[in-house]
């Protein structure tokens, strides 16, 4: 899970990948703006990739050469301040460092597929609209079964 996998930065700079790009494990290049962009989402991350492309490519070359480097990711597993991390830590069920997140893995395979594929958003006019109470925009499950007991619904938090 902590492994830095090869990333195609040209693909990340194009649209059609969804916000799954922020779930990937990136080399930590020591730049605050890059770390913040990973948490802020793909549009901001794209601009930071353009600004820091050489440093990112160099870090990947180091990984390929066997050098262990620090990582940064937008995935909750690597951000101990998130409610997800706290919830699973409290339950004693945090994934092991070598455990793989299936959603992150799925986005990675979309990212590296040949021929290149793109993701599309669910159309708002679809005959089966998705619930506005989904806890993640990229979540494919429907409430209430997808949210652990005790968590507040996203729309409830907006009202506070």
Image: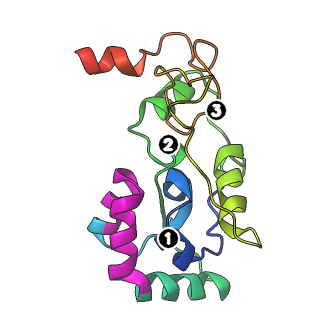
Disc 3 vs disc 1: which is toward the camera? 1
Segment tinted magenta in the rendering: 34-53
Provide the major secondary structure of the magenta segment. Answer: helix
Residue 52, image x, y percentages: 36, 81
Residue 91, image x, y percentages: 59, 21
Label 2 to label 3, Cα distance in Å?
17 Å
Residue at position x 42%, y 58% from top?
A: 42
Q: Is residue 134 left or right of residue 30?
A: right
Q: 59 and 66: which one is in front?
A: 59
Q: Please indicate, yes or no, whether residue 80 appears anywhere in the rendered image.
A: yes
Considering only vertical position in the picture, is 120 above or below 57?
Answer: above
Q: Residues within 10 Å of mark 3 (few under 14, many from 20)?
A: few
- Disc number placed over residue 14 in the picture, else none: 1
Residue 131, image x, y percentages: 53, 20
Residue 157 is drawn in which quadrant? top left
Q: Which residue is mark 2?
A: 76
Judging from the image, the colouring scheme is rainbow
Residue 111 is drawn in which quadrant? bottom right
Residue at position x 52%, y 30% from top?
A: 125
Image mark count: 3
- Disc number placed over residue 75 in the picture, else none: none
Residue 24, image x, y percentages: 56, 59
Residue at position x 42%, y 89% from top?
A: 54
Q: Which residue is mark 3?
A: 140
10 in magenta: no
Q: Earlier in the sequence, mark 2 or mark 1?
A: 1
Label 2 to label 1, Cα distance in Å?
24 Å
Considering only vertical position in the picture, is 103 above or below 70?
Answer: above
């Amino acid at each position: 899970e902590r492994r830095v996998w090869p990333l195609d930065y040209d693909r990340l700079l194009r649209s059609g990948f969804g916000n799954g790009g922020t779930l990937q494990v990136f080399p930590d290049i020591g730049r605050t703006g890059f770390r913040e962009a990973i948490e802020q989402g793909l549009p901001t991350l794209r601009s930071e990739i353009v600004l820091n492309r050489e440093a990112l490519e160099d870090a990947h070359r180091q990984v390929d050469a066997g050098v262990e480097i620090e990582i940064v990711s937008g995935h909750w597993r690597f951000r101990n301040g998130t409610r997800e991390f706290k919830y699973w830590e409290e339950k004693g069920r945090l994934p092991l460092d070598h455990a793989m997140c299936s959603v992150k893995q799925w986005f990675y395979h979309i990212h590296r597929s040949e021929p290149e594929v793109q993701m599309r958003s669910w159309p708002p006019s679809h005959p089966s609209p998705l619930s506005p109470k989904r806890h993640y925009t990229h979540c494919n499950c429907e409430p209430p079964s997808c949210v652990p007991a005790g968590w507040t619904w996203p729309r409830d938090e907006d009202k506070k």
